[in-house]
Amino acid sequence: MNVLKSLADRDRVFDFLVPVESPVDVRHGPILYLEDVTVSFDGFRAIERLNLTIDDGELRCIIGPNGAGKTTMMDIITGKTRPDAGRVWFGSRHDLLTMNEPEIASLGIGRKFQKPTTFEALTVFENLELAMAADKRILPTLTARTTGEVRSRIEEVMTTIGLVELRHRPAGILSHGQKQWLEIGMLLMQRPRLLLVDEPVAGMTEQEMERTAELLTGLAGQQSVVVVEHDMGFVRSIARTVTVLHQGSVLAEGRMDQVSLDPRVVEVYLGAEADEEVA
Ligand SMILES: Nc1ncnc2c1ncn2[C@@H]1O[C@H](COP(=O)(O)OP(=O)(O)OP(=O)(O)O)[C@@H](O)[C@H]1O
């Protein structure tokens, strides 16, 4: 019994026990950990001693006024921007500041930008197929045997994103919302552990927003999801925990109902938001 316990407590057990597709170690803490991260652009501090942790399987919304540093924070996590100081870890094993963008992506961090970038002339099915083939970890093993596995993964993802019936439809004639879901599906093909999603509902109809809320809340648990969004109605509908960024730091964090009553949050963000809604 003690032998088993000591094996389980070790940082790394035998190689054959470590799941190949899941190299991220979250046994002792969060999946994403940012500590005292600072970034300046020409002397201007876009991110200032930022601290943030995201738990495995969590759905987190990040809100904050224009220029608060939300995009820069995503850029740091994906390796696009290097901070001047601080620590950024993915699980307890991967120091993201020692890795480049493709290496970080191959760990299972997927990013969806605001504008959809699907291949318009290809069908829903083909876009998903291509997303799988683009994964360098899968490409060498794309044999007749794995084709079946790829197909069943495509079916699974099409069901998740609600596009099964549109499988033969070229992406170019999908609605804006359907394109956004397809792009999320393309990220899901590679079974990410963390999805970073930038303003997913901008330009969507009410109905599309509702389906996107269902999709993102359904994904959480299987993977961690970080959503940057300005639409407060949408944030309220999906968020369990909200982080408010302001001038590159965390101004407040907690449940949406608590955070939205925080006078500092009302002053720097929600006040302006309410004014916009009235206008
Ligand atoms: N490459 C850059 N060079 C100079 N300044 C930059 C650069 N990138 C971002 N900034 C500045 O850093 C600050 C934070 O910008 P960032 O885009 O991260 O904010 P944001 O919270 O995403 O804003 P928005 O909600 O408008 O997208 C802004 O003042 C921006 O002008």
Image (cartoon, grey):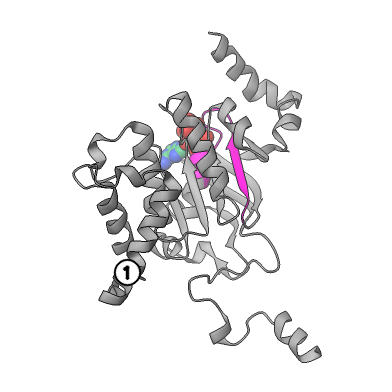
For residue 255, side relative to residue 129 (left or right): right
Q: Tell me the kind of residue under disc 1.
A: Gly
Foreground pick, 109 / 249: 109
Residue 265 x/y as whole percent = 69, 27
Query: In the displayed structure, would residue 271 be above or below residue 224?
Result: above
Outermost residue, top direction? 279
Query: In the displayed structure, would residue 41 be above or below residue 25?
Result: above
Foreground pick, 112 / 127: 127
Q: Point out the stretch of residues depicted in magenta.
A: 57-73
Residue 95 x/y as whole percent = 55, 66
Residue 112 x/y as whole percent = 42, 45
Pointer 1 local density, CA inside 10 Å: few below 14, some 14–19, many at least 20: few
Residue 10 x/y as whole percent = 70, 82
Q: Toward which corner of the image does residue 151 lie, by quadrant? A: bottom left
Query: In the displayed structure, would residue 47 be above or below residue 17?
Result: above
Residue 142 belongs to the span the image colors magenta = no
Residue in the picture at 63% in, 30% down: 236
For the question of whether residue 228 can be seen, the reply is no
- Residue identifier under label 1: 148
For residue 24, side relative to residue 145 (left or right): right
